[in-house]
Amino acid sequence: MRLGGQLFILFTILILCGCSSGQDLVKIAKEDLGIVSIADGRKVYYGMKRADVESVLGQGKEAERGVIKYDSGVELFYRDDEVAAIIMEEEAKGIYKTAQNAEIGMSKDEIEQIYGTIHMPSKKELPLTYVYDMKKGVFLEEISHSTEEEAKNLLLIIASVDKNSLRTDMFFIYDSYYLGYAK
């Protein structure tokens, strides 16, 4: 019994040390970097081919800066015929959610329960901005890249917050290349 107890304590210490050492890898599948229809579970995600998107969302209408607007509060930007930016507006509430189950109308605390607390610093009334390094599989606290290729590996997941209700009113999912180079 004494040896079993000691082994249990040693095992527990090893587990705790292993969990707290450094930044944990958060491998997110490409299909989970997008949005999901609440009704039927069909996904639209970063890197998805436009033809496949249109089989889910139908035909969209061109809006500003090359963004394509679809029904139910979804806007997409394509680069090389693949999704490079996803915008989920308030109109999407109850129709779409992120693939990680975040929805329009959630509090920042609820978003942190889903995506974690490693994000860019934010005040209460400002958006939560997550920076996900797709190559390394980790969330970062800042956007840092020196080349266009590095910018394409950093995906931003932004939960915009209504100033009055402090609830999410929009979600953005796009790489920092889109942010910096608008293409």
Image: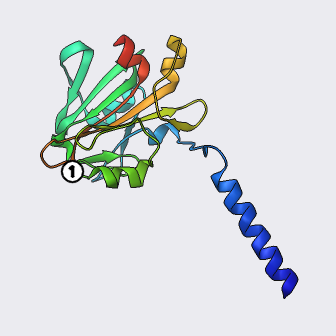
Query: Farthest bottom residue?
Result: 1
Name the residue carrying label 1: 105
- Residue drawn where x is 53% and y is 13% of the image: 146
Q: Residues within 10 Å of mark 1 (few under 14, many from 20)?
A: some
Colouring of the image: rainbow
Relative side of 78 to 162, left or right: right
The quarter of the picture where residue 9 lies is bottom right
Toward the viewer: 14 or 33?
A: 14
142 up-or-down from 79: above or below = below
Q: Position of residue 6 (x, y in %)?
A: 82, 77
Specify the amino acid type for callout 1: Gly
Q: Position of residue 181 (x, y in %)?
A: 38, 11
Q: Secondary structure at mark 1?
A: loop
Q: Does the image show residue 4?
A: yes
The quarter of the picture where residue 51 lies is top left
Toward the viewer: 117 or 54?
A: 117
